[in-house]
Image: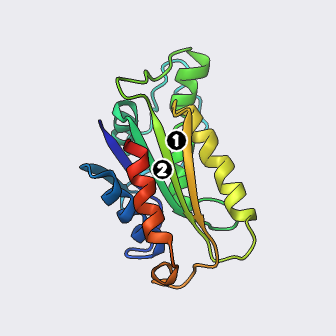
């Protein structure tokens, strides 16, 4: 089983990364992690270059990401909430999956499920009190998961977690992230 993860937070060692590491531990597997903030992923240019081939014409690290998505059985996305959505780093990568959308919906070529099927996990952390940010980010990630042929996913979310290390004060977050990782591969 191949598991990949996207670290969508620009803050190293922060709350989102802490939860992602726990979920990865829970999988008990060797997980390939894409640190989106350190990668060169240009925003989608909506140029139409992928409409006839399903392949983006912009040369950057996204080609490596798409290859990993195609081969993955389990996919984890971890992002903080920024202005009611996922981080810019996560959103740029998600938007560049337009090439997969074109391949799937225009060219009618789906990503095969493989031996283990495909499942996802979304880990989201926000400093606000209201769940609106989680709901908005969840809609984006759900659309992305469905585009990349992940028919089911679980979301774990934590609010009022803002300062570096705040997630460590949460009574159940680390255990829940570990269990979510474990459930993802079971």
Percent x, y of residue 110: 50, 20
Which SS class for mark 1? helix
Q: Which residue is mark 1?
A: 96
Percent x, y of residue 182: 38, 51
**177 and 69: which is toward the camera:** 177
Q: Could you tell me if the residues under marks 1 and 2 are in contact, i.e. CB atoms within 8 Å?
A: yes
Q: Is residue 30 visible?
A: yes
Q: Is residue 167 left or right of residue 4?
A: right
Residue drawn where x is 60% and y is 47% of the image:
141
Percent x, y of residue 90: 52, 55
Q: Is residue 60 visible?
A: no
Which residue extends farthest top?
A: 108
Which SS class for mark 2? loop
**17 and 59: which is toward the camera:** 17
In the picture, the quarter occupied by the N terminus is top left
Q: Is residue 135 left or right of residue 22?
A: right
In the picture, the quarter occupied by the C terminus is top left
């Amino acid at each position: 089983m191949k598991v990949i993860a996207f670290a969508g937070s620009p803050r190293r060692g922060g709350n989102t990364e802490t939860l992602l590491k726990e979920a990865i531990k829970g999988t008990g597997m060797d997980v390939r992690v894409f640190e989106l903030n350190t990668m060169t992923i240009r925003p989608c240019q909506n140029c139409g270059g992928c409409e006839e081939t399903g392949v983006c014409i912009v040369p950057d690290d996204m080609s490596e990401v798409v290859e990993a998505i195609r081969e993955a059985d389990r996919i984890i996305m971890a992002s903080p909430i920024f202005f009611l959505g996922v981080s810019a780093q996560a959103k740029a990568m998600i938007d560049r999956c337009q090439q997969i959308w074109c391949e799937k919906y225009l060219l009618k070529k789906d990503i095969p499920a493989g031996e283990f099927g495909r499942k996802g996990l979304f880990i989201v952390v926000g400093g606000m009190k209201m769940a609106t940010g989680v709901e908005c980010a969840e809609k984006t990630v759900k659309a992305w998961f469905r585009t990349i042929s992940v028919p089911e996913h679980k979301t774990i979310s934590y609010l009022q977690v803002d300062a570096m290390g705040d997630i460590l004060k949460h009574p159940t977050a680390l255990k829940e992230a570990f269990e979510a990782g474990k459930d993802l591969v079971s």
